[in-house]
Image (cartoon, rainbow, N blue to C red):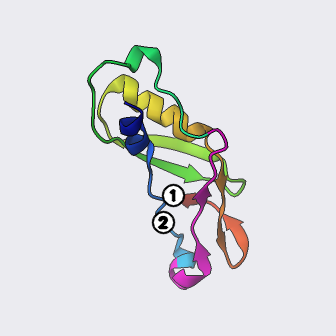
Amino acid sequence: MSKILAIMLSIAILASPSAAAQSNPSSLKPSHCSIGKGLPQLPDFLKGSGVQGTIVIGAIIGVNGCTQSVWVTRKLDPKLDEFAKQTVNSWKFSPATKDGKPVKVMV
């Protein structure tokens, strides 16, 4: 089950640059996740549920590297969706930068 959890919580960091960054996309550097505690353990109430699949999460990462908003764009199971949101919300990111300055991005 932990392998499934690792796959479920794997996210691709795809920066959605602002209009200013789009004029010179090479100057935008995407944010990177720096999880300090490793992958979370699946809660007991979800173990053995038999639910498998992929949940796609979207988030806004602020200039301080913290999530400002997290949402589910592809749902799987209400409890698992909420667990995935809470997990991503607890992660710390290195903020994206534009011209060397931190910027807010959507991932």
Q: Which residue is mark 1?
A: 106
- What is the three-letter code of the residue carrying label 2? Ser
Q: Residue at (72%, 53%) from the top-left corner?
A: 64
Quadrant location, the N terminus: top left
Q: Is residue 7 or residue 95 the one in the foreground?
A: 7
Q: In the rendered picture of this protein, how many numbered marks are placed on residues?
A: 2
For label 2, count other residues whose C-alpha is less than 10 Å away and answer few (under 14), some (14-19) or many (20+).
Answer: some
- What is the three-letter code of the residue carrying label 1? Met
State which region is magenta: 22-37
Give how far across and how far down residue 47 sits, in percent. 38, 19
For label 1, count other residues whose C-alpha is less than 10 Å away and answer few (under 14), some (14-19) or many (20+).
Answer: many
Q: Is residue 75 magenta?
A: no
Q: Which residue is mark 2?
A: 16
Q: Residue at (46%, 63%) from the top-left corner?
A: 14
Instruction: Describe the element under mark 2 as helix, strand or loop.
Output: loop
Q: Compared with residue 101, is residue 35 higher up or lower down, i.e. above or below?
A: above
Q: Is residue 104 or residue 31 the one in the foreground?
A: 31
Q: CA distance from mark 2 to mark 1?
A: 5 Å
Q: Earlier in the sequence, mark 2 or mark 1?
A: 2
Question: Of the numbered discs in the image, which one, if any, rests on residue 80?
Answer: none
Give how far across and how far down residue 50 sits, in percent. 26, 23
Q: Compared with residue 95, is residue 55 higher up or lower down, i.e. above or below?
A: above
Q: Quadrant of residue 36?
A: top right
Q: Is residue 91 or residue 107 the one in the foreground?
A: 91
Q: Cβ–Cβ below 8 Å for labels 2 and 1?
A: yes
Q: Is residue 57 left or right of residue 75?
A: right
Instruction: Describe the element under mark 1 as helix, strand or loop.
Output: strand
Give how far across and how far down residue 26 sits, in percent. 55, 83
Q: Residue at (52%, 84%) from the top-left corner?
A: 23
Give how far across and how far down residue 52 sits, in percent. 27, 33
